[in-house]
Amino acid sequence: MNPVPDMHRDVGISLKNRRNFMNPYLTVIGGACLFLLAAAWLITAENRRQKKERLKQIREQFGSVCERSCTGEELERISAFSRREDSKIPGYLDDITWNDLEMDTIFSKINRTMSAPGEEYLYRVLRLPKLMETSGHFRQMIHFFQQNDKAREEMQLILADIGKKTRYNTEAAVRNLEHAARISYLPHLVQAGALAVSLLLLAVFPVAAVFATFALLVLNAFTYQTGRDRKASEPCIHLFASLGRILEAGGRLEKVAWPQVENNCKAVARIRRDLGRFRRRLFWFSGGQGAGGSLGGLLLDYLKLFFHIDLIVYPGLLAEAKKHQSEFQELLEAVGEMDAAICVASFREWLPWYCEPEFDSSPSGKIELEEVYHPLLKNPVPNTMETSGHILLTGSNASGKSTFLKAVAVNGILAQTIDTCTAARYRAPRFQICSSIALRDSIQDGESYFMAEIRSLKRIMDFAQGGVPLLCVIDEVLKGTNTIERIAASSGILRSLARPSVYCLAATHDLELTAVLKNYYENYHFEETVEGEDVCFGYKLRKGPSTSRNALVLLEKAGYGKETVEAARVEAEQFQKSGIWEILK
């Protein structure tokens, strides 16, 4: 006789088995919840610590220059768009002038920006002096950030969250969206799906699922790091990460109500609203590339590493991004302008003295400089100069000629770019600026020093015929050739540059030029004095040609024999009287 089934007992066993079956799921879910709570707490604490540390750093750095120079790779990235696009615009500083005047160093000193758009904007501004009157909006922002520390620090904290950790120029990447690499999301979706399934099976088949999960983690990480798709899409992925951080920061910029930056903040807020759907998908492109490298960003980077989420989202996002290039350009400019204005405010605080430029729009405008100095000098000696035409500088080596030429040209650039001059007063026309100073032989190109000189001077003569007022500074005209031809050619070139709307400042050791060109050029000089065994340079600009004859004295002080020095002195005096060098016996 079959026993009667015990229904209560069977139900109890079933419930017990179900509880045993559910326990692994409850354990996994509970562990995951605890992990997320702990991660959220750590992320919040880390964000607070980073904000506190960043604010301290911001306060310490304001009013100082950056002592760290940009690396060649950084400058290549920062300048990429400017060199490619802005070089077509009138007023752009060519490479010779930029390098002659050490503008990379000046840019690095000023560059206290907090974001990639900021430093790219600052570089573009410095590289493109304005030939026409501007609205004055940039100057108003500089004033505002100079006078309002709290607002400036608040803005810098927002900009710091955008950061500048990117390998690519953001403006150039926006312009290149049409040519961005295309990839397929399907292989990455399959890999991510396989990993997700293996994780779900951990509770049912723990041993097999662990091995499968580990293998998939390794495979997914390897293909993500070494695969062709990630490398091809990398420029756009960096761009999307930057745009995501900017649009996220836009949430705080919406609340800013300062009139001086209102237009910029409203532009960011408007674009942020218009790109709502696009912005939400950008979340997957943020992470460790951010300014702080936070714990949250690190966790997101691991999710992308193992699940390829950014590569899955990339194709659709790229297609949508191509529709919004103009909005992205406006976004980068709005953010970059505010960041650059804060930099200039900091630069002004660091300078021993400065002024805002006055521009003379009359056809025969003068250059009027009072107490002008070079911004890279630690203990500058200021000079005052006024001219409506052309200047010929004479003086011995190391007396200050080249430094003064550079100071005038650099101040012309700073005046027409960041409205800040290292002078007590600056008044001048707006002009194209070019130079011929730090030339050298080129072994690689097989070009001699003299060939480099004549090519450099020819481009200045071409600029002079461009119909735009021109400031040109030339150091040691044609020193790469013999004396007779140098003086003849130099006088011809300098005379051709002595035309209306050209302001030519040239330095020379050839005193003959001061007489030959006296009808075209005003003469100024620097001089030195010999005191005991020392040579003292005053670095003060004086009117008239140089009259000092200290070279022979310096030879004597350096230990050359008196007989040699005296013979040279006699020869020099004889030449001054007769204009002929005697044959030595």
Image: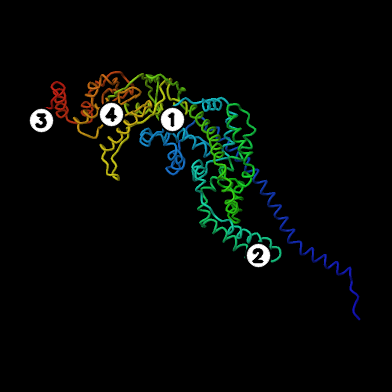
What is the C-alpha distance between the residues marked 4 and 1? 31 Å
Residue 114 against residue 210 in the figure, above or below: above
Q: Secondary structure at mark 2?
A: helix
What is the C-alpha distance between the residues marked 1 and 3? 54 Å
Q: Which residue is rendered at x = 91% and y = 75% of the image?
A: 4
**Depth order, front residue of 321/154:** 321
Q: Secondary structure at mark 3?
A: loop
Q: Secondary structure at mark 1?
A: loop
Q: Which residue is mark 3?
A: 584
Q: Which residue is rendered at x = 55% and y = 39% of the image?
A: 326
Earlier residue among tags 2 and 3 = 2
Q: Which residue is mark 1?
A: 129
Image quarter of the N terminus = bottom right
Residue 466 is situated, as x and y percent measured from the top left of the image, at 36, 29
Residue 304 image label: none
Earlier residue among tags 4 and 1 = 1
Residue 37 against residue 566 in the figure, above or below: below
Residue 417 in view here: yes
Q: Nearer the viewer, mark 1 or mark 3?
A: 1
Q: Which residue is mark 2?
A: 209
Q: Which residue is mark 4?
A: 397
Earlier residue among tags 1 and 3 = 1
